Amino acid sequence: MAVDYTPLHVAAEGSARLGRISTPHGSIATPAFAPVGTQATVKALDPRDLAELGAELVLANTYHLYLRPGADVVAEMGGLHGFMGWAGPILTDSGGFQVYSLADRRQVSDDGVLFRSHIDGSQHHFTPEKVVGIQEQLGADIIMCLDECAVPDDRAYVELALARTHVWAERCRAAQTRSDQALFGIIQGGVFADLRLRSADFLVGLDFPGYAIGGLSVGESKALMYEMLDITVPVLPADKPRYLMGVGAPEDLLEGVARGIDLFDCVLPTRLARNASLFTRHGRLNVRNAAWARAPGAIDEDCACYTCRNFSRAYLRHLFKAGELLAYRLATIHNLHFLLQLMRDIRQAIGADTFAAFKQEFLAHYPIVPDEVRAQNRDKRMTRRRQ
Amino acid sequence: MAVDYTPLHVAAEGSARLGRISTPHGSIATPAFAPVGTQATVKALDPRDLAELGAELVLANTYHLYLRPGADVVAEMGGLHGFMGWAGPILTDSGGFQVYSLADRRQVSDDGVLFRSHIDGSQHHFTPEKVVGIQEQLGADIIMCLDECAVPDDRAYVELALARTHVWAERCRAAQTRSDQALFGIIQGGVFADLRLRSADFLVGLDFPGYAIGGLSVGESKALMYEMLDITVPVLPADKPRYLMGVGAPEDLLEGVARGIDLFDCVLPTRLARNASLFTRHGRLNVRNAAWARAPGAIDEDCACYTCRNFSRAYLRHLFKAGELLAYRLATIHNLHFLLQLMRDIRQAIGADTFAAFKQEFLAHYPIVPDEVRAQNRDKRMTRRRQ
């Protein structure tokens, strides 16, 4: 068995649960957050940093690595573990989400996705079989089915995409040749309760070793996202891990855990860090602000990360203003530490049957970015980039 | 005494020597190479990296730190040591060289240098007194006199600049108020033997705790640079450290050490690293080259640095091609390790009275970049930048 999930403890109230995922490259204490290493590197960090931060799972992107340096190159270098020098568990996505966000550069058909590379415009075709083959070359411990991520509130499109996602899930299962990798199914269905249920039922019927919930946190409100989790998670088997894709805001980790989610990944902490936006228990702080020019204190005096133990806000501000590479590194260390520490605290609280109180206490101090502001930020980002 | 130099061993043949410089922040085994942290950070590295690399002295730039974040800010944050989180010895230059390279943005008079900031065009005035005051705020262990670095082969200009440099050296000495910092004099004189001797004589007469040799490696041939060292070093007192400014090519470190130099600094290893140009015992290797796309081996299989112990050429090439921040970090670690290891090997060889043979053996395998190519690269760089 490539991946084995052991439930360890379910919270006295609610659905939060402790567990352990075993993989050929080590085990993952869940609930867990996976930092994202899109191009086989968590931006600005090295694998030693990740180990020191206590990361137990790293995500890499099939779409990016397929285009550059090529899955064959990664395979020749010993797979992702050897290539990027990370000996712990790795998860690769299927490339579906990246291709979906290429917008005008891709064409989806029942057979797969035709798309143009954001690097050189070259044309490529992803099919379920091809995507499994690429992920077998990359060699992650957990791999994902090809799915189609539709506009979440366009019912006709979501239904069409769901039908494809289900056929593709079957084709992915059939295409798998390696037994040391766990292939997860991805539940879609937009913001429609009946479609989410239909998708969960269908995929559970295929008996995957784990289930991802995709197509959320793509523009819908937080309330709707939580509602979809409320509907979906209860129909998933208790002895399989549940992975909420692309979600990483602190409040969403808490709400996801409360609903029984075991795994999360998101570029949020690392992307925010490179924009000088740093997590604290009282919300995000932009360290470029002039207010910190002479601030001798750490980002968070109680934080145990390398950055907070050694550097002032004034120094971090200076590094950002001066465009120094160290800025990105120190900020990334802090933001990842914040989320990974949050997950450790969450696990501790679940074990002590105090999770509900822990969640309430955390959210009482943490101001949540409103849906409208998140939507604006998303629009700006999508306009700027192609991947 | 802020800084105390102890000669430990002079090579059986030649002038190479082992020594130790004690400072309030620890001691430096010499001959030593100092990585450059222009803006209070060695680009892409953190202080822990520097300690792991075995760096014992870091250089920071007065010109840059005066402009941003300001010497007063650094002073408030506990001086450079506190600000940048580096507990070991630090050296600051006087800003003279940076101002000199501003070309059309500066005006030198007997009183000092009027210049415009490369950041915002604001006007500033450096005098010997001001530059010492700034360096006292920055709080390095070794600080430098303000000097004027002339075009090395323009005799009339060199003579004029030399006269100023000498008066400024006296004014710097008189301006010093801190007793825990060692103020070094800077010998100038272009490529003229008699002027170099005149400068050395004059400054030795002022009895500085250390002597720097400036205005070399600024466009003259390597042969001329070595000739100037041959002339200058013998008239310097044996019980004071000798610092060759801005020199860091492996062959120049060996030739400098052979002539009795104790300290070196240069942006070369860190700048080359960010351009994917990596030191090996057989010359520089550009890791962006297509030849390394599937190369499983390290940059140097015998190298003990973190980068070579963990990553293939193929991975480094991928990081550079993908524009990943980790590329700069891993390449910088390797290049600094190469030079710092070279200095360790040099010290070991001097101690064993085998330095001459070590130097010959190293240079037999290390192809030197010809003077013409160096001149072209320099011209390109000077055209591109303003600092």
Image (cartoon, coloured by chain):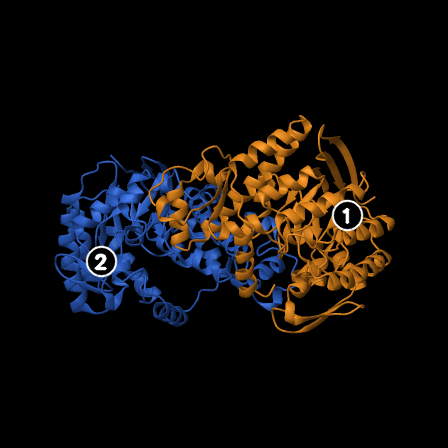
Chain colours: A orange, B blue
Q: Residue furthest bottom?
A: A122
- The chain letter for the residue carrying disc 1 is A
Q: Looking at the rendering, which quadrant does residue A100 occupy?
A: bottom right
Tell me, for residue B283, which label it has, or none. none
Q: Which amino acid, by three-letter code, is at mark 1?
A: Tyr
- The chain letter for the residue carrying disc 2 is B
Quadrant containing the C terminus of chain A in the rendered view: bottom right
Quadrant containing the N terminus of chain A in the rendered view: top right
Above or below, B151 relative to B30: below
Residue at 35% from the left image edge and 48% from the top image edge: A290
Mark 2 — residue? Answer: B188
User: In the picture provided, is B174 more to the left or to the right than B228?
Assistant: left
User: In the picture provided, is B387 more to the left or to the right than A99?
Assistant: left
Q: CA distance from mark 1 to mark 2?
A: 71 Å
Instruction: State whether residue B159 appears in this view.
Output: yes
Q: Looking at the rendering, which quadrant does residue A362 occupy?
A: top right
Residue at 64% from the left image edge and 27% from the top image edge: A354
Tell me where residue B104 appears, x and y as whole percent.
24, 68
Q: Looking at the rendering, which quadrant does residue B75 occupy?
A: top left
Mark 1 — residue? Answer: A211
